[in-house]
Amino acid sequence: MPERWNVSNPDQLKRLNEHLAAKLDEGKSTLLEFVDNERNSDQNSLFHAILREVAKQKGDESVGDIKRYVKLTMGVPILRASDAKFRELYDDTIKGSLSYEQKLEAMDILPVTSRMGKKDFATLIDDVIQHYTQQGYHIKITNI
């Protein structure tokens, strides 16, 4: 199973170095891929605050349920439009092969939001707010 590390401060870098050293001590090699992550923690915090607010107002669905729905119905279309590799993988393995319920379950392990850059993630946040506002929910985030 691949590991992902988001290194954005000296403490995280130290933990990564310790982890890599332990892997080498075990005789395992590691492939590193450097990717510019345009997203920032403010976007992530806002997204999760919105999900919590929607779940709180809905009352009958957990934050995880809301996140799965959002990833599948809003995130997947955004990512399919902007990421050819994702589109190919999704279309070949998930799109026509799984039921809606299975697709929702797949959202727990399929990287959707984590593959998004700042622009796509901003679009997703806007879409989520618009979707739930149109359904009568009041998205008011006072504390992230």
Image (cartoon, grey):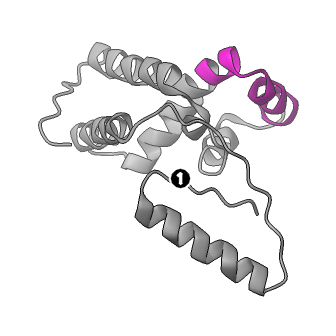
The residue that appears at 29% across and 44% down in the rendered structure is 52
Which residue occupies the foreground of this view, 136 or 44?
Answer: 44
Q: Residues within 10 Å of mark 1 (few under 14, many from 20)?
A: few
Horizontal side, residue 103 vs residue 124: left or right:
right
Residue 60 against residue 124 in the figure, above or below? below
**What x and y, as percent, mark residue 43?**
36, 33
Which residue occupies the foreground of this view, 14 or 94?
Answer: 14
Looking at the rendered structure, the number of numbered marks drawn on it comes to: 1
Q: Which residue is mark 1?
A: 6
Helix, strand or loop for the magenta stretch, by majority: helix
Horizontal side, residue 69 vs residue 56: left or right:
right
What element does badge 1 sit on?
loop
Q: Quadrant of residue 100?
A: top right
Residue closest to the far bottom: 25
Q: Which residues are magenta?
A: 78-96
**What x and y, as percent, mark residue 112?**
61, 36
Based on the picture, tell me whether residue 49 belongs to the magenta stretch.
no
Which residue occupies the foreground of this view, 83 or 23?
Answer: 23
Give the amino acid at mark 1. Asn
